[in-house]
Image: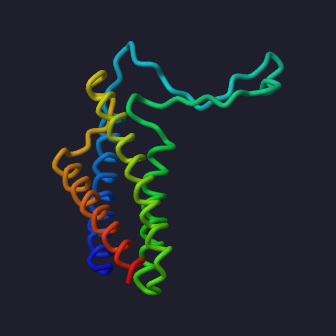
Amino acid sequence: MAIVVLALWAVTAAAGVALLSAGTAARRMAASAPRTADAPVRTGAIPRTADGRPPPAPQAQFDARPGEHPLLEFSHPALAITGLACWFLFVFSRYAPLAWIAFGFLVVTLGAGLGWLARNSRAAARGGDTAPAFPPRLIMVHGAAAAVVLVLTVLTAVAASHG
């Protein structure tokens, strides 16, 4: 059963990669669209003092579009890869604590993914065209596969702990 979970986890990861590709493509399309007059222009230049030097203590500013959050966009895939690596190690070593560690990573990954989905949904409801457009069918496939992986991971971890 552990190998089935590993294969299903790989299918979930493939759907996630497809989602990231679709989101990146939607973001590129939105960036190439002509800007309206009321849209702020983003610039990466640091304001200079009168003598041409940078200010004494520049403040890092976080400027993300509605629906974007770099921490969620990084942590969801990073946690998923780490959990998949732990599960991969469990499959080959049959060391039960690795299954529970992978399950822990899976739960945290699920929380980050649901947070990312909620943030994008709220941004799409508010702004409409500013949030990246993820294909709903692909979101459903990714979420359903993740739910099945979660259930099978628990069942396999319990079986490995008791057997």
Residue at figure coordinates x 34%, y 68% from the top left? 153
Give x and y (percent) for residue 71.
51, 43
- Extreme front residue here? 162
Nearer to me, 5 or 141: 5
140 displayed left or right of 50: left
Nearer to me, 62 or 52: 62
Q: Is 105 drawn above or below residue 159 in the view shown?
A: above
Residue at figure coordinates x 27%, y 80% from the top left? 1
Give x and y (percent) for residue 133.
26, 39
Query: What colour-coding does the image apply?
Result: rainbow
Q: Quadrant of residue 107?
A: bottom left
Give x and y (percent) for residue 48.
74, 22
Q: Is 107 drawn above or below residue 36 in the view shown?
A: below
Nearer to me, 149 or 65: 149
19 displayed left or right of 68: left
Give x and y (percent) for residue 100.
45, 68
Q: Is 70 drawn above or below residue 18 in the view shown?
A: above
